[in-house]
Image: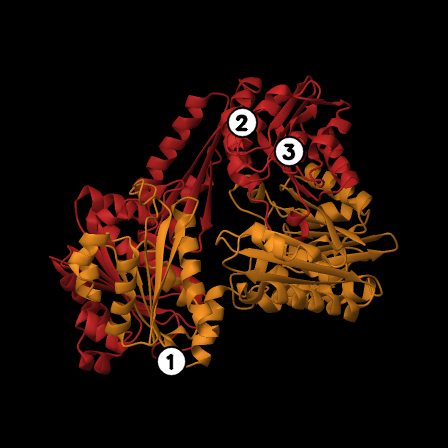
Chain colours: A red, B orange
Amino acid sequence: MRAEIIATGTELLSGGVLDTNSLFLSEELMLLGIETAFKTVVGDDEKDMEEALQRSLARVSVVIVTGGIGPTEDDITRKVVAKIVKKRMVLNEDALKAIHTRLTGRDYGTTNDRQALIPSGARLLQNPAGVAPGFFIDESELFIAVLPGVPKEMRAMFSEGLKPVLAERFANRMFIRRRLVRTCGMSESAVNQAIQDTLKRDIPVVGLTVKETGGVDIRIIAREPNADQAQTQVDRTEATIRGKLGDAVYGVDGRELEEVVGALLMQRRLKLAVAESCTGGLIGGRITSIAGSSEYFERGVVVYSNSAKTEMLGVPLDLIERHGAVSSEVAAAMASGIQKAARTDLGLAVTGIAGPSGGTEQKPVGLVFVALSTAQGVKTAEYRFLGDREQVRLRASQMALDMVRRHLIA
Amino acid sequence: MRAEIIATGTELLSGGVLDTNSLFLSEELMLLGIETAFKTVVGDDEKDMEEALQRSLARVSVVIVTGGIGPTEDDITRKVVAKIVKKRMVLNEDALKAIHTRLTGRDYGTTNDRQALIPSGARLLQNPAGVAPGFFIDESELFIAVLPGVPKEMRAMFSEGLKPVLAERFANRMFIRRRLVRTCGMSESAVNQAIQDTLKRDIPVVGLTVKETGGVDIRIIAREPNADQAQTQVDRTEATIRGKLGDAVYGVDGRELEEVVGALLMQRRLKLAVAESCTGGLIGGRITSIAGSSEYFERGVVVYSNSAKTEMLGVPLDLIERHGAVSSEVAAAMASGIQKAARTDLGLAVTGIAGPSGGTEQKPVGLVFVALSTAQGVKTAEYRFLGDREQVRLRASQMALDMVRRHLIA
């Protein structure tokens, strides 16, 4: 069972905007056992859209179109689909009712009614998160669904409306199960070496991706006629990988390191404070991106200047003068300084040279010291990251969070 | 002149990876007067790739393929292109030499030589940033170029090799010039109202996009047979828009608000310190993402707890008790507190409710207070942002940076 995802919208061709909907859709289709064979982006041009649709119907069995179903003149998707499948457009009463309900009390342009026109024979997909309804056409050799372009609306409509339809329509096919095993602190070649036997096997498929954070993600994809079998394969392979990589694995799938660290702190009822130099607030920003982080994040400081380090953290000025602001000693003093000032269980600190300038032969761009102060004392670590300013900062924040994680699970 | 960009690679279909190359390419093609009509993504499957290539040659005049030209078994792009254009593969000596030079002293697998095979009649494109060479075929009714999938290599090869070829081949066509005028602090409908006359005109094309930061970007695209004429149109339209929107315009094209604020601070030799609550380090992170920010960013604090607000910023505990931590009064005290502690020219502070929990009827999720303390006193502003935690935080950081910008240009 193969699918094509067609994203419509001129802004996706030349407006500097990327189609991200297809990322979500191909993932969801995969879990239903439907493989995405093509993705196409086409502008709001009638001829081009016709061409793309016609082509997709000739080469795959499931076509999902996103975008172009709003109320304005350039929203032509409904019309073009009707033309291609040779149906006339009819006014759907349920759709009209939903649009009216949604827009009650708002500025109601008459063009909004146009959104209730769908091809005859098509079935309506209500929009749980917006106005424009979608629809799908299900005939013997043809399955075509039309969803909104706004990601939030597209996702809601897919999950609540289209997904159950697809699951039923394409049941008893291959089941695909997938897992991402996420690691931190090991290089790609080290991960490769450690799990090479698993990588060599064909079933399930296992692959590596190096992330911007410097961490390595391991993809496991199992494809079986039986869902349980596929799941068992994934679970077993994950267990094998975890056995080989140990603490380097911090989580699976969409779970980010800041979530893992947050959950550990919450569970152990510990509080954290952070002192950042080169990361400039990035670590605080990542920790506090998690809802409920006020339970365990007490405070953070961004100490860019030496006087800030001295005044706010009590780092002795002569320590900075002796070892330099970017040094293991200053990192340690920053960590114990913030822990003491905030009276928290843990004090985390980072100092380094993010670049592009400021590096020397002795202390090159990418040199970063991380320190963690706890009741058991202060640990420090030294890193030399490759990459540009953004990468160095991101990688430094990752290793700093990882130091907290490793301390908490030790 | 219309183009199709074909990205190859199974990881772009189901590996959770987005094709970002086409964003760069469509932009570059546009500047050469070539419009991208279709973007296609296809896996490392011979039949599918043949189908996609064949289709593209039938519907546009310029085809650019990225990816699948490395040394491994699943790198099949070269072979498929040769088949579609009915050429045999020949070993290109220049390509072979370049590959050998590049890999001198490294682990040299024999499969690397395969990368020097290109279709007969094709012209070589050297890879300035990697190993795999690219090529292009230029015949009367056919122009097809093949570039690497690695973004850095693709960009270097395009800019140094393919761009001059395209510029010459498709000279004397239409020239496209483009500008993004970026605004902050005005809603989409307010921008729409203010520049409606400009939006209505067809030449140049003007459109609006609402960004995640809450700001509105205005796209200007001029398409003329003469490059100067296109540029003049863009410049004039930008001037008109700036005239209507005034200070709401903070920059153009890729320039972000943190860069604008940084440049203003640098120019005026002023120093800034920041106290954040709900944004949790995001503002510090954005400011310090700019190289050289240590010149004007003195320090930042993330004061999540009340005791942090009191101890680090001297915010009186009874002020917090009287008005709540999320209040105009506390924001003002935080701003003057950080300004005083850091002895900087400006003290910026944010306090708010990012959600999803913590909101009340009186103080709902999305309520944010921003304050700026300067020699002239303290300014505060109140916002009620819509959206999830991430959006509220991002929008709050944007309006906070904008308050600094507006103060500096006043």
**Marking on residue A112:** 3
Q: How many marks?
A: 3
Tag 1 secondary structure? loop
Q: Is residue B410 left or right of residue B58?
A: left
The chain that hosts pointer 3 is: A
Mark 3 and mark 2: Cα distance apart in space: 12 Å
State the residue position of label 2: A101
Looking at this view, name the residue that lies furthest to the right. B140
State the residue position of label 1: A361
Quadrant in the picture for residue B158: bottom right
The chain that hosts pointer 1 is: A
Quadrant in the picture for residue A131: top right
The chain that hosts pointer 2 is: A
Residue B130 in view, yes or no: no
Q: Amino acid at mark 1?
A: Glu
Residue B202 in view, yes or no: yes
